[in-house]
Amino acid sequence: MSAVFVRRLLLASVVAGCLTSTALAQTPAPTCGGDLSTFLQGVKAEAIAKGIPADAADRALADAQIDQKVLSRDRAQGVFRQTFLDFSQRTVSQARLDIGRQKLKQYADVFARAEQEFGVAPGVITAFWAMETDFGAVQGDFNTRNALVTLAHDCRRPELFRPQLIALIEMVQHGDLDPATNTGAWAGEIGQVQMLPEDIIAFGVDGDGDGHINVKNSAADAILTAAKFIQSLGFKAGQPWVQEVTLAENLPWGKSGLGNEIPAGEWFKMGVAPRDGNTSFGDLPAALVLPQGRKGPAFLTYPNFRIYLEWNQSFIYTTSAAYFATRLSGAPPYLKGTPEPGLDDSGMKALQAKLQSLGHDVGKVDGILGSGTRMAVQKEQARLGLPADGWPTQGLLSAL
């Protein structure tokens, strides 16, 4: 399920106030919680206030129920513990590459339109299509309407999900969604590239010309909608997103890592060499990314890589998705290298606790190699005279 890799739930949200009709002004419905029927009255009133016909709201909300399985999923979200090599080898499989290449041929005209109108390379869209739903095969089996009612009614994050419920009602109004039968991910994401209703409303494209936007059943709609959405995240046509590189022996490792961008040409001068030999993007800012340290796979990430971080904030997922897109665009398999063994869960927690005691902000001691831990590792590696590549090892833990 793509929902396991929980992507950012929406581009921007504001806390949704509970807009009510004149009839409800004396007793406004709650923005979350309480009696479900009263809550749904408030949702209906808000939809009407935004110009959605009452009958569309009635159709969308009829027989809506709280789904306890959605709440269980929301409370039990897992944490991402796999290494880049483990995750990317599993997700960027030969079978997926073969299917992806078949899809690129099958929908060549649609991808050509996506690139012409939105400037997004076919491989970028196809990689997301593969990783999110296996090209539409696994889209989720939660009733979308009930999932969003559940999460909007729940008082944990109503400001995120109530606008999505309103957007779903608008999709019902347009005839683009059947609230009784439409299924998707537990967090309300719909379709072959798993998008939220607000994003479908904002960026939906009728790719097959049937007068509707159906990202669940129409590959053409899903491809073009994804392309328009990716463009909105800032993707620049004709620019790379990630480029595999080989490394010189004595680089300034402390300059590596996301956020440490310098012109790519400066990396080239220091001995960072693109495997494809293309150094024409030397003026673009680039970060040297070492998912498993200087002895493992190495990449330069360019401004277009930021769209991956907008799609999903997991570093391992985003780097794998970006690499997948390069493979679909003709790049060879990456060089695995010989990375030093990382730390297991208990070792990572011990390292984080030690880093915290040394004054570093690593966030929660949870055994997850997040950006805060990587930055702290780099600082301690530099202090100890070790190559500051941000990869935590048993040697570093012992040295601390």
Image: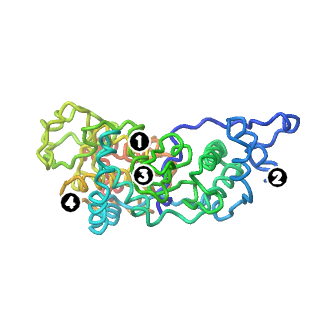
Q: Residues within 10 Å of mark 4 (few under 14, many from 20)?
A: few
Q: Tag 4, which secondary structure? A: loop
Determine which residue is flagged by label 2: 35
Q: Nearer the viewer, residue 79 or 373?
A: 79
**Is the Cβ of the residue at disc 1 closer than 8 Å to that at disc 4?**
no
Q: Disc 1 and disc 4: Cα gap in Å?
A: 29 Å
Q: Is residue 20 left or right of residue 183?
A: right
Single out the mark in the foreground, 1 or 3.
Answer: 3
Q: Disc 2 and disc 4: Cα gap in Å?
A: 55 Å
Q: Amino acid at mark 4?
A: Pro
Residue drawn at point x = 50 percent, y = 59 percent? 3
Q: Please report whichever mark, 1 or 4, sits nearer to the chain's N-terminal start.
A: 1
**Is the Cβ of the residue at disc 3 closer than 8 Å to that at disc 4?**
no
Single out the mark in the foreground, 3 or 4.
Answer: 3
Query: Which numbered dot is residue 208?
Result: 3
Single out the mark in the foreground, 2 or 4.
Answer: 2
Q: Tag 3, which secondary structure? A: loop
Residue 107: image location, x then y, percent: 32, 56
Determine which residue is flagged by label 1: 228
Residue 106: image location, x then y, percent: 30, 60
Query: Which numbered dot is residue 333?
Result: 4
Q: Please report whichever mark, 3 or 4, sits nearer to the chain's N-terminal start.
A: 3
